[in-house]
Image: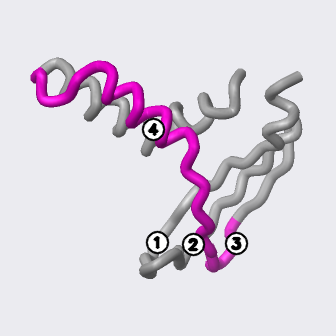
Amino acid sequence: MATFELYRRSKFGMCLTEAVDEMVSNSTLSPELAIQVLVQFDKVKSKVTIKGHLHTYRFCNNVWTFILQDALFKEDSQETVSRVKIVACDSKLLLQ
C-alpha cells in the first residue's frame, strides 16, 4: 500500500475526492486539474500540535491507536474537539 493511500482513505481524503469528482462531473473542474489537486493533497506537510486527555491507547500489528478527549489542535488557529481517534503507523513498513 502506498503512503498516500492512508491519506486518501481518511475522512478528509474521501471528502476531498468526492468533492473533486462531483466538480469534474459538473464540468466545474477539468480532470487534469482534479488530479493536480489530489496530488497536492498527498504532499501536504504541515505541523499540528495536539493536546488533550488520553482516554485510550493501543499498539497492535505496528499500528498505534490513540483516543483523546477534549483535544486542542493548534496550527495557525486553535480548534477544540470533544473526542478524536488517531491511527498512526510507520510509513516505511508500507513500502515493504
Is label 3 in a helix, a strand or a loop? Answer: strand
Q: Residues within 10 Å of mark 2 (few under 14, many from 20)?
A: some
Which residue is labeled 1 in the image?
Answer: 82
Residues at marks 4 and 2, CA–CA distance in whole angstroms: 23 Å
The label number, if any, that marks residue 68 in the structure image: none
Name the residue rendered at 39%, 36% in the picture.
37
Residue 45 in percent (x, y) is at: 60, 55
Whether residue 45 is visible to the viewer of this picture, yes or no, is yes
Answer with left or right where residue 37 lies relative to residue 74: left
Q: Which residue is mark 3?
A: 54
| Measured Cα–Cα span from mark 1 to mark 3 | 12 Å
Tell me which label, 1 or 3, sits earlier in the chain: 3
Between disc 4 and disc 2, whose residue precedes? Answer: 4
Quadrant of the rendered structure where residue 34 is?
A: top left
Label 2: state its secondary structure. Answer: strand
Report the colour scheme: one colour
N-terminal label among 1 and 4: 4
Q: Earlier in the sequence, mark 3 or mark 4?
A: 4
Query: Is residue 1 magenta-colored?
Result: no
- Indicate the amino acid at tag 3: Leu
For the residues labelled 2 and 1, the Cα–Cα distance comes to 5 Å
Residue at horizontal 51 percent and vertical 66 percent from the top: 83
Which residue is tagged 4?
A: 13
Image location of residue 89, percent across then percent down: 78, 43
In the rendered view, would you say 60 is above or below 26?
below
Seen at 51% across and 33% down, the residue is 8
Q: Earlier in the sequence, mark 2 or mark 1?
A: 2
Type of amino acid at the residue the image marks with label 2? Gln
Amino acid type assigned to the residue bearing label 4 in the image? Gly
